[in-house]
Image (cartoon, helix red, strand yellow):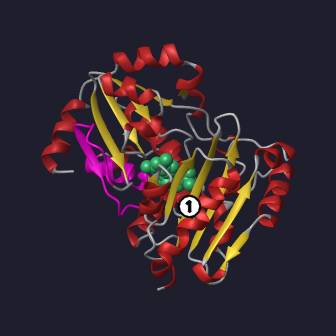
Amino acid sequence: MTSAEINEIQVLLSTPKHIVIVPHKNPDGDAMGSTLALYHYLKQYNHEALVIAPNDYPDFLKWLPGDDTVLKYESDTDNCQKLIHQADLIFTLDFNALHRVGPMGDDIANSKAIKLMIDHHQQPDDYAMYVYSDVSMSSTCEMVYRFIDLLGDDELVTPEIATCLYTGIMTDTGSFRFPSTTSQTHYIIGKLIDRGANNAKIHNAIYDTNSYEKLQLLGCALRNLKVIPELRTAYITLSQDELNQFDFKKGDTEGFVNYGLSLNNIVFAAIFIEHKKENIIKISLRSKGDFSVNEFSRQYFEGGGHTNAAGGKSDLNLDETIEKFISILPSHKNELTS
Ligand code: 5GP
Ligand code: MN
C-alpha cells in the first residue's frame, strides 16, 4: 500500500460512511478476528459499520467482542443485500477472490461501493480499488494492526480490537509456530497484550472448550489416519455417517489435519470430510517446507490458499476422491521426498 493510497483512505474515512466488512465463507479465527477488529476501529470514527459474514461460524469464535452485531448473509439474505447495495465502502478481509464468499460475491461485485482488500493469500483477483495484499504476513489480523498503524491510529487500539487481533494471529499461526510467524508478529502480539488482550483467556476460549463428542470424533479421525511413508504423506477421512455418530458441529474438525503433519518424516497431510448435504468432499491440505499445497489444490481440487495451508473440494464420492488423491501423489514424488 503506497503512502498516496493511505492518504486517500484517510480522506475517505474522515467523514461518516456506510461500511460493510466481509470475511470469507466458513470464517475462521483470522477472518472473524480481523473483520470485528476493523469494525471496532471504524465505529470510533462514527461510521455506520457492520460485519456481514457469508454464513455461520463455529461456537468457539462466538465470544469475540462484537460477535452479537454480525449479520449472516445465508440466513438474512434480503437485509444483507440491501446493506451491501447501500454501502459506500466494502472491506473484504482474509480472502482475495469473490467466489470465496459464495453467492454474496455477486452482490459485492455489482455494488457501486469502493472496495478495499486486506489479505495474505496468494494470487489476488482484481476487484478492489485499494489492495493491501502481502503473502508474507502471518495473518490478516497482523495486517489490520499494521493498517491501523499506517493510518496513524495505533492509539485507537482498544482492548476489544486487541482481543480480536490477538485471536486471529494466534489461530492463523498455529499459536505462533508456523514459519510465517516473525519477530514483527511477536512485537505486534506484545503490543496487543499491552493494549488489553488477555492471552491466557483467549487461548482458553479457543482451545479448551472441546465437547466430549468432539474428542470422540478426533479419536475416530485418528483411527482413520493412513500413512504413505514412501511419499511422506498422511491423510484422514471422515464420512458423513461418522460425523453424525459423534454429533458433528461446525468447527469440530478444525485442526484435525495437523495430526497427520505431526508424524515424524511426514511433509504432506490431508483430511477429506464428506458433506452429504452439499454433495461434496471438503479437503484441507497442509505441508512442511517447499511443497506448495496452494498449487496442488488449485491444480486438482478447485481450491487454493497458502504454500503450507490450503483448502479445496471434490465432487466425486469419498472413495473416489481418495483414489484420485492417491493416484496423483506419485507424480509429485520428487518434491515430496527431496
Ligand atoms: P482450511 O483448510 O483451514 O479450510 O483452509 C486453509 C487455508 O486455505 C485458509 O487460508 C483458507 O482461507 C484457504 N482456503 C480454504 N479453502 C479454499 C478455497 O476453496 N479456495 C481458496 N483460494 N483458498 C481456500
Ligand atoms: Mn488468514
Q: Is residue 254 visible?
A: no
At 38% from the left and 48% from the top, the residue drawn is 144
Residue under pointer 1: 285
Q: Nearer the viewer, residue 144 or 294?
A: 294
**Mark 1 residue element:** strand
The location of residue 47, given as percent across then percent down, is 36, 25
Q: Is residue 118 above or below residue 189?
A: above
The location of residue 50, given as percent across then percent down, is 45, 27
Q: Nearer the viewer, residue 334 or 175?
A: 334
At 60% from the left and 29% from the top, the residue drawn is 68
Which corner quadrant of the image does residue 93 belong to?
A: top left
Residue type, label 1 = Leu
Would residue 168 appear left or right of 227 to someone viewing this image?
A: left
Q: Is residue 83 above or below residue 99?
A: above
The location of residue 286, given as percent across then percent down, is 55, 65
Q: Is residue 337 above or below residue 305?
A: below
Ligand 1 closer than 8 Å to label 1 CB: yes
At 12% from the left and 45% from the top, the residue drawn is 4
Q: Is residue 117 above or below residue 286?
A: above
| Residue 205 magenta-highlighted | no
Which corner quadrant of the image does residue 81 belong to?
A: top left
Q: Is residue 89 visible?
A: yes
In the image, the segment drawn in magenta is 123-152
| Residue 125 magenta-highlighted | yes
Would residue 17 appear left or right of 255 to someone viewing this image?
A: left
The location of residue 212, given as percent across then percent down, is 86, 52
Q: Nearer the viewer, residue 225 or 263?
A: 225
